[in-house]
Amino acid sequence: MSKAFFFLVAIASGISQTGATCHDNEIGDLMEGQVLDHPTRPCQRYICQNDTLITVNSGCVFNGTCYRIDSEWQSGCQTYKCDVKFKNNTVWYISEVKTPRCEHGDKCFEKGQEWVEKCGTYTCKVVKSNGTYICEPIRIRQECTDINGNCHGSGDTFAFNCTGIPCDCTCATDTNPVRYRCQVPNVK
């Protein structure tokens, strides 16, 4: 999970003043009050104020894209929000997970949501540790699969393919992984 931290920077460096404009060798001239986004650094802006070029960060950078304060976006199964924190006279722009979800295959699941896949029942477990969400699908039940792909619980008897020979099996789900107890018919 990616987090981006950016702090507000108000600097004037490598700048010469030319009348009512600000000049920088990298970006050129700006008129008083003009705001310009940096062409290659997401979220970085230049402001010409009182003949001084000020550089400020203006949002959260996430995977090379600038997101403005309070904006939300989706990445994978997670919904992020750009938030601002003030600490020790510094402004921090933080990409926070707003809605943590589990990813399983190509699907997203909410915290506590259950789903069935290939006779296994899963739940989405979400834990927050040191400010970071850990989202993982956990298998909570497993059933046996018959010859047709149908699911069967513990104690059920069903037809199964025992190395090319049809047989009757009983499902035992008291252990992990599940066990098949099968009887192969006498073949003449």
Image: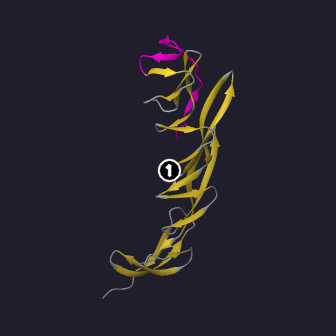
The quarter of the displayed image where residue 27 is located:
top left
Instruction: Using a 10 Å C-alpha cutoff, classify the residue at mark 1 as few (fewer than 14 neighbours), some (14 to 19) or many (20 or more).
Output: few
Which residue shows up at 60% across the image and 49% down it?
100
Q: Is residue 78 magenta?
A: no
Q: Is 10 left or right of 88, judged from the image as shown?
A: left
Task: Please say if 112 is above or below 38.
Answer: below
Which residues lie in the magenta part?
1-26
The question of residue 2 being in magenta is answered with yes
164 displayed left or right of 73:
left
- Viewer-proximal residue, 188 or 142? 142
Q: Is residue 46 above or below residue 148?
A: above
Q: Which residue is mark 1?
A: 76
In what quadrant of the picture does the C terminus appear? Answer: bottom left
**Residue 133 image position (x, y, % from top left):** 60, 44
Instruction: Pick whichever, 36 or 173, lies toward us.
Output: 36
The image quarter containing residue 134 is top right
Residue found farthest to the bottom: 188
Residue drawn at x 43%, y 30% is 39
Query: Residue 23: percent from the left, percent from the top?
Result: 47, 16
Q: Residue furthest front?
A: 19
Q: What residue occupies the far left of the structure in this picture?
A: 188
Please tell me whether mark 1 sits on a helix, a strand or a loop.
Answer: loop
Q: How far across and down, in percent of the image, does residue 48 sit?
A: 55, 21
**Amino acid type of the residue tagged 1 in the rendering:** Gly
172 left or right of 159 in image? right
Q: Toward the viewer: 57 or 182? A: 57
Q: How many marks?
A: 1
Q: Position of residue 6 (x, y in %)?
A: 57, 29
